[in-house]
């Protein structure tokens, strides 16, 4: 297997931290044992957990105002997956990559698959893009794609999604994620009903092209780039889509796609209950679709989402198998560092949720003891599970301290010497 970070760098960094980690792990193990929790069982679950890295996340993002490129930015999909493998090598929590077509130009699928294999990476859900125009594209998506008033434009969007399925199939992916920017900027600009009818009609064609073992995830988002209305605006509409399309269709929840203060964990619970939770795009937000690093603003909310997931996992909820992906945009940090931290935050929320005393919680809920119910959640959330995460990484040939080890490796400086600096410029996320 190709290792992007030399093993001796990881070993040296780990050696300096192993004794302290062992002590911390032992101490936490004793404290958890007093609560009736076996630390090794939690660690095994955390070690088996993975979240996909978005290929678009390893480049520096930008806003509609400006983009300030970083050093050593990936030039193509091969550079991108090398960066993704650094994240996986150090965190051991990101075994797959989620591609975005045509941002990722996949001219040689076989070569990409071989490169993925060599780096020990698999391919997660494919993402289509009908929210921007590709340079060689015949018809514009300025006024929509899958819901466009023009049938030929809709067909072009359908064909693009089918092409994504075909690329994904050759790479070993098993799902397609469809997010559209379709909507309107002015009251009256579009017919809510007709555009949704057209969307459903087009998505039925995409659905019909899914291989037998594939799923399609539709991703809702309240606003942007359309600012008055969007066609797939919320989880209710998303659920209707999944119902209309059939059993392979599920809803994808991007944490940044809701109005402020919306109870996302409750949406998650509802979708689990009705077997339509397809997956996540994890990120964090303060105002809107900020695409901030996962857990950087509201780690408690992330924990509450995982609390629902672990609850479903524990009671073996029927049809429950969501896929987990990150979806972030990095403007002021090294994307590799941000993605490593975010993968760790997601694993942390999972580990904390595994610590919830579910029997006690159920008792407090049934007995209307609101205070003790919420304290039960807080007791899990307050537990510092870092020794569990770090031990899982260490035992899996990862880094006890991923960011420090990455900095020590000099990876960014090395690729900066090989990859020419990209120009700064206007907005856009690629
Ligand atoms: C839309 C979105 C969607 C896209 C990605 C780049 O805001 O969350 O998932 O594919 O951003
Ligand atoms: Mn998303
Ligand atoms: Mn988004």
Image (cartoon, rainbow, N blue to C red):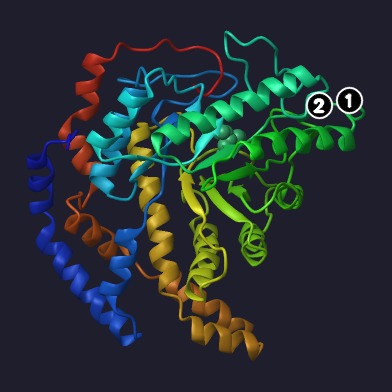
Tell me residue 162's x, y (percent). 59, 29
In which quadrant is the N terminus drawn? top left
Q: Nearer the viewer, residue 80 or 389?
A: 80
Local packing at callout 1 (Cα closer than 10 Å; few below 14, some 14-19, many 20+) is few
Residue 161 higher or lower than 395, as above or below:
above
Q: Is residue 41 left or right of residue 109?
A: left
Tell me residue 172's x, y (percent). 40, 39
Q: Is residue 371 left or right of residue 88?
A: right
Please tell me in which quarter of the rendered image ligand 1 is found. top right
- Mark 2 C-beta to ligand 1 under 8 Å: no
Residue under the point 53% across and 70% down: 312
Q: Is residue 57 left or right of residue 405?
A: right
Tell me residue 58's x, y (percent). 39, 30
- Marks 2 & 1, CB-CB < 8 Å contact: yes
Residue under the point 60% across and 21% down: 64
Residue under the point 33% across and 31% down: 113
Residue 200 higher or lower than 277, as above or below:
above
Residue annotated with mark 2 = 185
Quadrant position of residue 290: top right
Residue 353 higher or lower than 426, as above or below:
below
Residue annotated with mark 1 = 189
Residue 244 is at least partly visible in this image: yes
| Number of the front mark, 2 or 1 | 1
Quadrant position of residue 142: top right
Tell me residue 227's x, y (percent). 76, 31
Q: Nearer the viewer, residue 24 or 130?
A: 130
Q: Nearer the viewer, residue 146 or 385?
A: 146
Residue under the point 61% across and 38% down: 289
As helix, strand or loop, the secondary structure at mark 1 comes to loop
CA–CA distance in space, label 2 to label 1 = 7 Å
């Amino acid at each position: 297997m190709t290792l992007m970070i030399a093993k001796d760098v990881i070993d040296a960094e780990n050696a300096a931290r192993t004794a302290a980690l062992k002590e911390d792990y032992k101490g936490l193990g004793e404290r958890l044992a007093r609560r009736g929790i076996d630390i090794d069982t939690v660690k095994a679950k955390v070690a088996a957990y993975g979240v996909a890295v978005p290929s678009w996340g390893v480049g520096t993002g930008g806003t509609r105002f400006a983009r300030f490129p970083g050093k050593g930015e990936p030039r193509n999909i091969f550079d991108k997956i090398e960066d993704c493998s650094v994240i996986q090598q150090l965190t051991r929590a990101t075994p797959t990559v989620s591609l975005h077509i045509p941002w990722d130009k996949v001219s040689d699928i076989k070569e990409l698959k071989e490169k993925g294999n060599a780096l020990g990476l698999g391919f997660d859900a494919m993402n289509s893009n009908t929210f921007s125009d590709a340079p060689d594209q015949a018809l514009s998506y300025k006024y929509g794609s899958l819901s466009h008033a023009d049938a030929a434009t809709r067909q072009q969007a359908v064909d693009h999604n089918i092409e994504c399925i075909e690329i994904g199939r050759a790479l070993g992916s098993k799902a397609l994620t469809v997010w559209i920017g379709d909507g309107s900027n002015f009251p009256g600009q579009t017919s809510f009903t007709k555009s949704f009818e057209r969307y459903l009609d087009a998505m039925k064609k995409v659905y019909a092209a899914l291989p037998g073992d594939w799923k399609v995830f539709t991703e809702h988002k309240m606003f942007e780039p359309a600012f008055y209305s969007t066609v797939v605006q919320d989880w209710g509409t998303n659920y209707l889509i999944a119902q209309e399309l059939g059993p392979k269709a599920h809803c994808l929840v991007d944490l940044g796609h809701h109005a402020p203060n919306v109870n996302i964990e409750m949406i998650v619970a509802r979708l689990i209950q009705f077997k339509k939770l397809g997956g996540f795009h994890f990120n964090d937000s303060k105002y809107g679709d900020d695409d901030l690093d996962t857990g950087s603003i509201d780690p408690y909310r992330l924990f509450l989402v995982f609390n629902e997931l672990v609850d479903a996992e524990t009671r073996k909820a029927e049809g429950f198998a969501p896929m987990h992906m990150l979806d972030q945009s990095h403007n002021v940090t090294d994307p590799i560092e941000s993605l490593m931290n975010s993968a760790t935050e997601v694993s942390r929320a999972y580990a904390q949720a595994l610590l919830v005393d579910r029997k006690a919680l159920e008792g407090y809920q049934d007995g209307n003891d609101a205070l003790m119910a919420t304290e039960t959640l807080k007791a899990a959330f307050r537990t510092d599970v870092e020794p569990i995460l770090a031990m899982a990484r260490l035992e899996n040939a990862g880094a006890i301290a991923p960011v420090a080890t990455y900095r020590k490796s000099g990876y960014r400086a090395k690729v900066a010497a090989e990859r020419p600096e990209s120009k700064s410029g206007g907005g856009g996320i690629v």
